[in-house]
């Protein structure tokens, strides 16, 4: 009887040892899996993209409407800069196409002064041609529009050559609602058609301002972007930029 009791004790002890070993091994497996999972999660968090981008505004008062906005922080460039601090305004009120060459030169000055290569992740937005058309409104013809656009296309191709990796967006022309400018609509149509063809042929992008600058409230001083219109322009630009 004692012999059987001892055998039973040995069997129970053996079972307990076996169970203990199994529990220990399972715990070891769990302990080795946890760091792997945490490591993967940490890697996913730390490798999130921190790429920054630079916005450059080139051209005329469509992008630099500061002279027509009297509420601080509500001009096109200020609205953009509020959400994207790395923004440079080189556009000038009243600028014509040829004035943009001087503005583009400022990009290289930024690079030299800040020791930064802006050519790697740069978005350039160009609004030009409107003042050329306005200044010739009394003598406009289809041939004159074509001549202006030739100047414009030469400018843009030069810009593209200087900054081959830049994302270049060209703003087309909107239709001022003031009745004094109704006679320009035919020429604005012609310009926008030429621009559409040019961008398609040269793999550039267009911001179609004529699709959202549609209300009287979008304009101030008859033809300039108002606070409302300026916000639409700023939003269109910001939505084009990938950080």
Image (cartoon, rainbow, N blue to C red):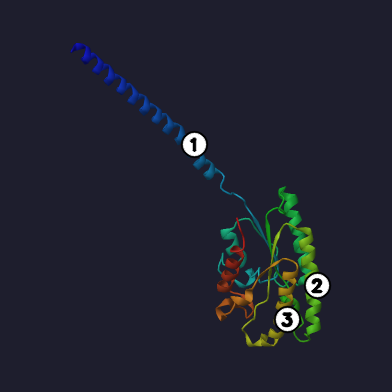
State the image quarter where residue 222 is shown.
bottom right
Q: Which residue is mark 2?
A: 151
93 to 46, vertically: above or below: below
Q: Earlier in the sequence, mark 3 or mark 2?
A: 2
For the residue labelled by badge 3, is the local secondary structure a helix, a strand or a loop? Answer: helix
Nearest the eye: 167 or 70: 167
Nearest the eye: 169 or 70: 169
Q: Earlier in the sequence, mark 1 or mark 2?
A: 1
Given this view, does label 3 or label 2 mark the residue nearer the observer? 3
108 to 30, vertically: above or below: below
Cα gap from disc 3 to disc 2, whole angstroms = 15 Å
Q: Is residue 233 visible?
A: yes
For the residue labelled by badge 2, is the local secondary structure a helix, a strand or a loop? Answer: helix
Q: Which residue is mark 1?
A: 36
Given this view, does label 1 or label 2 mark the residue nearer the observer? 1
Q: How far from the left and from the top, in percent, is residue 128?
A: 72, 71
Q: Which mark is residue 190?
A: 3
């Amino acid at each position: 009887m004692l012999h059987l009791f001892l055998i039973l004790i040995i069997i129970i002890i053996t079972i307990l040892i076996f169970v203990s070993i199994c529990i220990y091994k399972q715990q070891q497996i769990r302990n080795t899996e946890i760091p792997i999972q945490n490591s993967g999660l940490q890697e996913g968090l730390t490798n999130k993209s921190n790429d920054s981008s630079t916005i450059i505004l080139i051209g005329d008062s469509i992008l630099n409407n500061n002279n027509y906005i009297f509420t601080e922080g509500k001009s096109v460039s200020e609205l953009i800069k509020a959400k994207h601090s790395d923004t440079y305004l080189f556009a000038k009120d009243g600028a014509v196409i040829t004035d943009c060459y001087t503005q583009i030169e400022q990009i290289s000055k930024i690079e030299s002064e800040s020791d930064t290569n802006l050519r790697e992740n740069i978005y350039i937005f160009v609004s030009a041609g409107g003042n050329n058309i306005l200044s010739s409104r009394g003598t406009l013809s289809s041939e004159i529009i074509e001549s202006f656009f030739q100047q414009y296309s030469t400018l843009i191709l030069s810009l593209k050559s200087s900054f081959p990796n830049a994302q270049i967006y060209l703003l087309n022309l909107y239709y001022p609602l003031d009745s004094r400018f109704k006679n320009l609509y035919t020429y604005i149509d012609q310009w926008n058609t030429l621009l559409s063809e040019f961008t398609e042929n040269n793999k550039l992008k267009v911001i179609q301002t004529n699709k959202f600058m549609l209300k009287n409230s979008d304009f101030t001083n008859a033809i300039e972007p108002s606070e409302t219109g300026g916000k639409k322009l700023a939003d269109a630009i910001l939505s084009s930029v990938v950080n």
